[in-house]
Image (cartoon, grey):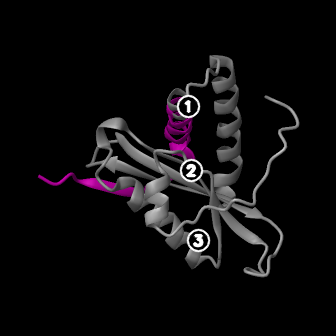
């Protein structure tokens, strides 16, 4: 039996779903990595992510997609792509790039190719709008899917965390 799954571009009405998936994703990652994060940090992240989506979904600087089960409003999975300005490189003279984030599939819907479907949708959207590169920070659980789709690990990134939230 095939699942009837509907792909939809997210809009302002879907922000609650996207925020819930974003928080669930990080909670699972932290659990796998045995890191303790207090609920206040998750709440602060949720508020900030909601603000980001409220500002950026309407203007297109963040795009997101959700898979829904059949004709219901039950979300199966979601992903987002932020359009960011970076510096041109010898490999890409443009300064616009994508940052793929918040890929999350509900537990009961995993291992059915839905993450791959959403990521391909984001890649196609980026391609259609002239974006030549997409970065992401994969979880251990998602790394294989990204590699399968052509993402390559870059060992040249460093970060300075100036202040913890």
* Residue position for label 2: 138
> Mark 1–mark 3 contact, CB under 8 Å?
no
Asked whether residue 9 is in view, the answer is: no
Q: Residues within 10 Å of mark 1 (few under 14, many from 20)?
A: few
154 left or right, relative to 128: right
State the image coordinates of residue 121 (x, y, percent, origin top left). 46, 66
| Residue under numbered circle 1 | 33
Residues 68 and 127: in front is 127
Q: Is residue 48 visible?
A: yes
Q: Residue tagged by mark 3?
A: 126
Q: How many marks?
A: 3
Magenta span: chief secondary structure = helix
Give the mark, 1 or 2, whose residue is nearer the N terminus: 1
Residue drawn where x is 44% and y is 56% of the image: 144
Span colored in magenta: 1-28
Q: Residues within 10 Å of mark 2 (few under 14, many from 20)?
A: some
Which quadrant holds residue 33?
A: top right
Q: Rate crowding at label 3 as few (under 14), some (14 to 19) or many (20 or more) other CA atoms within 10 Å.
A: many
Magenta-colored stretch includes residue 6: yes
Query: In this rendering, would 21 be left or right of 3?
Result: right
């Amino acid at each position: 039996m095939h699942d009837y799954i509907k792909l939809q571009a997210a809009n302002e009405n879907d922000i609650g779903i996207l925020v819930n998936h974003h928080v669930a994703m990080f909670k699972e990652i932290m659990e796998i990595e045995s890191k303790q994060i207090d609920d206040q940090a998750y709440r602060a992240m949720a508020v900030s992510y909601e603000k980001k989506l409220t500002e950026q979904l309407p203007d297109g600087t963040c795009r997101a997609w959700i898979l829904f089960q059949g004709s219901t409003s039950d979300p199966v999975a979601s992903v987002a792509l932020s359009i960011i300005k970076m510096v041109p490189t010898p490999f890409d003279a443009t300064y616009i790039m994508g940052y793929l984030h918040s890929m999350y599939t509900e537990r009961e819907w995993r291992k059915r190719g839905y993450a791959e479907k959403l990521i391909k949708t984001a890649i196609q959207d980026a391609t259609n709008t002239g974006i030549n590169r997409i970065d992401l920070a994969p979880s251990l659980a998602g790394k294989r899917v990204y590699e399968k789709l052509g993402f390559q690990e870059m060992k040249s990134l460093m970060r300075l965390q100036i202040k913890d939230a």
